[in-house]
Amino acid sequence: MLKSIEEVLMSLDQIIQQETDKQSGMAYFAILYRHMTARVLKGVQTGQFENGDRMVKLDVLFAQRYIDAYHAYIKKSPLTQSWQIAFDACTLNKPIVLQHLLLGINAHINLDLCIAAASTAPKDQIHGLKADFEKINLIISDLIDGVQSKLEQIWWPLRLIRRIVNDRHEAVISFSIQTARKASWGNAVALAELADPIQARETYIRSIDLGVSRIAKGILNPGIWSSMVLRFVRMGEPKDVRKIIDILKEEIPV
């Protein structure tokens, strides 16, 4: 089990290297997540969170769920439907880079974050976590905006399709981080306050996973018109997975 954010960063580095060597799109989310984790560590070191020790605990529990899901997938062991869909998508040629990132973010915010938050601050303690919970989500949102800006610099027509992902009805990919954040917080509070921490908790988590997997399917298959737009985007993306990995590894503007 991981014990520090530094250990999380080392584990993510190992995943990134393994998937880079295989030229696999599974490296994309791992790289984004490493950027996020590094920013959380910096935030803890500079006192940006209300409770630094609590944030370290939350970050480690949060990361452990993704890392465990990754290793379960590699070993072909059971894992949540949400991560199964996200990882399976990495074997397909159809999704664009942002779809891969959003599939990972969907599973991690909508499922993993609420579970980690409830474990970090059980029962009434959960309410004191909200401000720092919001800060993690803002970091993720800023990183996604930064990634899209970076990709637009490399392939300029992407600038013409700026509404690839946002919370408006016209978005090509209907995924809103704001909506995910609200849903995740609501589920975190419900999990933290459950009287029976074993049976009821596991049942509730399975129901969350079912709903999150439906969102994942929508991200992957957003409809005929949107799929045509995404196909156009995919045609313009670098075909070399290593090139995309190198782009994502660079510092992301926010």
Image (tube, helix red, strand yellow):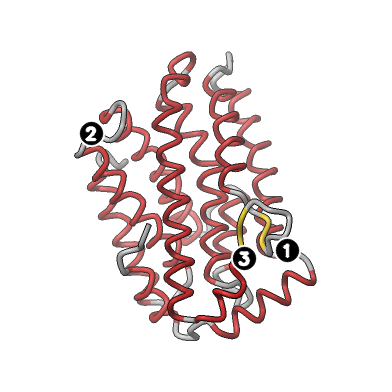
Q: Residue furthest front?
A: 160
Would you name the residue on which mark 3 appears? Answer: 164
Q: Callout 2: 10 Å neighbours few (<14), some, many (20+)? A: few
Task: Say left or right for 132 vs 105.
Answer: left
What amino acid type should be assigned to the residue bearing mark 3? Ile
Question: Which secondary structure lies at badge 2?
Answer: loop
Dot 2 and dot 1 residues touching (CB under 8 Å) = no
Closer to the eye: label 2 or 1 = 2
Q: Horizontal and vertical percent for residue 84? A: 59, 56
What amino acid type should be assigned to the residue bearing mark 2? Gly
Question: Which secondary structure lies at badge 1?
Answer: loop
Dot 3 and dot 2 residues touching (CB under 8 Å) = no
Whether residue 239 is situated above or below residue 72 in the rendered picture = below
Whether residue 203 is situated above or below residue 223 in the rendered picture = above
The Cα atoms of the two marked residues, 2 and 1, are separated by 40 Å
Q: Callout 1: 10 Å neighbours few (<14), some, many (20+)? A: some
Q: Horizontal and vertical percent for residue 133? A: 44, 33
Q: Name the disc covering residue 47, or none.
A: 2
Q: Horizontal and vertical percent for residue 132? A: 39, 32
Whether residue 191 is situated above or below residue 42 in the rendered picture = above
Tag 1 or tag 3, which sits nearer the N-term? 3
Task: Say left or right for 206 vs 72.
Answer: right
Tag 1 or tag 2, which sits nearer the N-term? 2
Q: Name the disc covering residue 222, or none.
A: 1
| Quadrant location of the N terminus in the rendered image | top left
Dot 3 and dot 1 residues touching (CB under 8 Å) = no
Q: Horizontal and vertical percent for residue 64? A: 39, 44
Q: Callout 3: 10 Å neighbours few (<14), some, many (20+)? A: many
At 40% across and 27% down in the image, what residue appears?
120
The Cα atoms of the two marked residues, 3 and 1, are separated by 11 Å
At 49% across and 81% down in the image, what residue appears?
155
